[in-house]
Image (cartoon, rainbow, N blue to C red):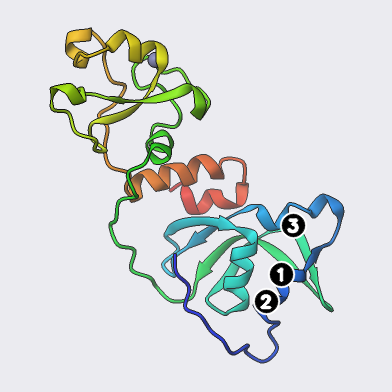
Amino acid sequence: MSARTNTETPPGRPAAGMLASAATHRDSDGNALHMPVLVLNASYEPINVCAARRALVLVLKGVAMTEEENGHFLHAARIAMRVPSVIRLLEYRRIPHQSRALSRKNILLRDRNTCQYCATVLPSGELTLDHVIPRSRGGSSTWENLVACCHLCNRRKGNQSPLEAGMKLMREPRAFNLHTSRHIMRLMGRGDGKWRKYLFY
Ligand SMILES: [Zn+2]
């Protein structure tokens, strides 16, 4: 998400740059600036998740406003600011129906670190990427032909198609689009009651 850069600081608003030297209230709030913040479009549609620090910069620049707070305070210079939990952009942004870059990380994210054959959830390091139609058989490296796979299933499947190996995919692999992003936002938001009304409807 790109924010319009506003070099002039509006009167009455502290400069965003001061966040760099800002300290949070209590030691226990040390992580407050890294906490995830839900970003809504002007239409209240959830579009992104960013760190609290970035969210505060957007609010200070007048690009977004705080919709929900997370209960933490940020103390900078002589002001105390409430750290947001949900912010909303003041101007509607057109979100292109773009796909994310095809990468190992994003495939694992899409598949939620779950082997798509045996449904085992594993740390990223213990998963590999499986070409559903093997490369040697003309299978391409695309969103639709790559899935997260445990080493056991990967060996078992070998150089075969799932049908030949007698293995079944949990779901048909698709490109990572806004729908998938929203699913991930929901997973992230499960722990934050303040996100709920924007994500579950
Ligand atoms: Zn497996």
Q: Residue furthest left?
A: 138
Which element is circle 1 on? helix
Which element is circle 2 on? helix
Mark pair 1, 3: CA separation: 21 Å
Which residue is the site of mark 3? 71
Ligand 1: give its quadrant. Answer: top left
Q: Look at the image and tell me in which quarter the N terminus lies.
A: bottom left
Q: What residue sits 77% from the left and 68% below the top? A: 22
Residue nearest the observer in this picture, 177 or 151 = 151
Give the crowd class for mark 1: few <14, some 14-19, many >=20 residues within 10 Å.
few
Q: In this view, does 152 lie above or below 103?
A: above
Q: Identify which amino acid the numbered label 2 is placed on.
A: Gly
Q: Position of residue 73 (x, y in %)?
A: 78, 63
Q: Where is residue 135 in the image (x, y as percent from the top left)?
A: 20, 26
Which residue is the site of mark 2? 17
Q: Is residue 36 at least partly visible in the picture? A: yes
Q: Where is residue 146 in the image (x, y as percent from the top left)?
A: 28, 31
Q: Identify which amino acid the numbered label 3 is placed on.
A: Gly
Marks 1/2 in contact by CB < 8 Å: the verdict is yes
In this picture, residue 99 sits left or right of residue 19: left
Give the crowd class for mark 2: few <14, some 14-19, many >=20 residues within 10 Å.
few
Mark pair 3, 2: CA separation: 22 Å
Q: What residue sits 48% from the left and 43% below the top? A: 186
Marks 1/3 in contact by CB < 8 Å: the verdict is no
Marks 3/2 in contact by CB < 8 Å: the verdict is no
Q: In this view, does 10 lie above or below 172?
A: below
Q: Is residue 12 above or below residue 5?
A: below
Circle 1 or circle 3, nearest the eye: 1
What number is the disc on residue 20?
1
Circle 3 or circle 2, nearest the eye: 2
Residue nearest the observer in this picture, 70 or 56 = 56
